[in-house]
Structure formats: C-alpha cells, structure tokens
Amino acid sequence: MLARAFVISLERATTRFEHAKSLLSQLPMDAEILPAVDGSEMSDAEVAACHHRHVHHPRYPFALRRGEIGCFLSHRNAWQKIIDSGLDAALILEDDVLVDSDRFRGAIEFVRAHAPKDSYVQLPVRNVPRDVIALSSRGGHRILLPTITPLRTSGQWVTRLAAKRLLRATETFDRPVDTTLQMHWITGVRLLTLDPSGIRDLTAELGGSTIGVGKKRSLSLEKVSREFNRAMYRAKIARLSNKACA
C-alpha cells in the first residue's frame, strides 16, 4: 500500500506551524506539511465559488466563518493530494495534536492492515461514542462504526476511494467540514473510528483555534440562541443518522 502523511498547518500561526514541523519526524511514514488555506485572505468571489448557504437538509443554522471555509478547503486539498500523488491512502493530521509515538505507531499499523479499501477512519482526540459496532480488533486496537459520526478532524486515515467520493460531494459546501462528514447519506462515505488513536488534542497549549471560534464566558442572548440552534441542529442530525443506519 502506497501511503503518506500530511500535516495541515497555517504558516502565519507560527507556534502551531513549528509544532507541525516537529510532528513530521514522529510519524510512522513519509510526511510533509500541507499548507492550510487562509480563509482570511480569500476574496468574496473565491468564497462564493465554494460556499453556498442552505444546500443540504437539515439547514446549517450558522453563517460560516472565513476560517471554517479555509479549513474545509485545506481538507479538500489533502484529499486532492491523495489523488494527484497516486496514493492508496493518507494519514491526515491537523497541527494541534500531540502524538504518543509508540501507541500511535501501533494504531497506524493496525488501521493500515485492517481498514476497508474505501474507508475514512477518524483518529479521535475525544472519547469514542457508546453507540458503535466493532468491525475489527487486534492488540487492543479497534475499528468502530458509530451511529452518529463524531465531530472533529484532528486526525484521519483517508483512502483513495473515500477521497474521490468526498471531492465529488463537496465541490460546494454549506457547513464546516466535520459537520459535512457526519452526513454520510450525502457524501457516500460512512466514517469509521479508531480506538485508541494514539493522539490527543493540544489546541489550548498552542494558543487556541485558528478558525475564529472563541468561547465567550459571558452569558448573552446571542450565545443562548446559538446554543439552542446548535442543539436543535444536532438533534436533527441524530435522527437522520439513525434513520440512515436503520
């Protein structure tokens, strides 16, 4: 199997970019930095070419930030890189993860040997959901099929076939990349989850998110409204996920 690792990083975020470079030597395969798309530098015409509101049901209740658009395009670039490089699969990491080298090496060896040839396997930095089906296991590692796809794109193993399907399905998009990936009935790619992944989240230690999503401590009417809309949206996704798995 021909595979390579890509670490997505925004060069102007210097602390994270330096961390991304340090990750390259810790990965169990040839690796390179994949420059992230800087959404703040995109023109209105460039945004309009890829982002349309309310394309899919359920409607995503929030306007996308430029950073979220850049993040989505960065992952699309990684998927395209798989195709253009003639790879069978790629390990794709964002620049805010910490690698447990020994555990991570075993995890990647396992997923490389046992993941289906058309799969997209998440490497989560959070606890895996309870509602899962175990597809394969060995040496303490498991590939799981969750009913509701977990959010976050910190790490993933993406095969060539999955990359092709995702590129076709996301020529235009209306929500962030992780919420789009939840909708496998739209993308044609059902995400699997690897447990344990051998990586953990390092966002806070690296200065926070680069996509412009901050957490306000004050309780405002706007925040209450956002949380209500978020909960309603996630409930709709849960119902559609259960229906699609029935």
Image (cartoon, rainbow, N blue to C red):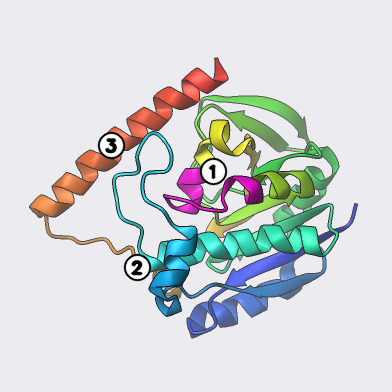
- Give the amino acid at mark 3: Ala
Give yes or no for contact between labels 1 and 3 (Cβ–Cβ under 8 Å): no
Which residues make up the magenta segment? 167-180
Residue 141 figure quarter: top right
Q: In screen coordinates, is 235 left or right of 176?
A: left
Secondary structure of residue under mark 2:
loop
Taking the image as drawn, is residue 99 in sight? no
Q: Residues within 10 Å of mark 2 (few under 14, many from 20)?
A: few
Secondary structure beneath disc 3? Answer: helix
Q: Which mark is residue 181?
A: 1
Residue 157 in sight: yes
Q: Where is residue 241 in the image (x, y as percent from the top left)?
A: 48, 26
**Above or below for 31 versus 111:** below
Q: Residues within 10 Å of mark 1 (few under 14, many from 20)?
A: many
With respect to residue 116, does 126 lie above or below?
below
The three-letter amino acid code for the residue at tag 1 is: Leu
Q: Name the residue under label 3.
A: 231
Residue 130 vs residue 237, the one in the foreground: 237
On the picture, is 102 further left or further right than 229?
right
- Residue 211: where, in percent of width, then height? 40, 67
Q: Mark 1 or mark 3: which comes first in sequence?
A: 1
Q: Residue 120, image x and y in percent?
A: 68, 43
Magenta span has 238?
no
Numbered tag placed on residue 212 in the rendering? 2
Q: Is there CB contact under 8 Å for labels 2 and 3? A: no
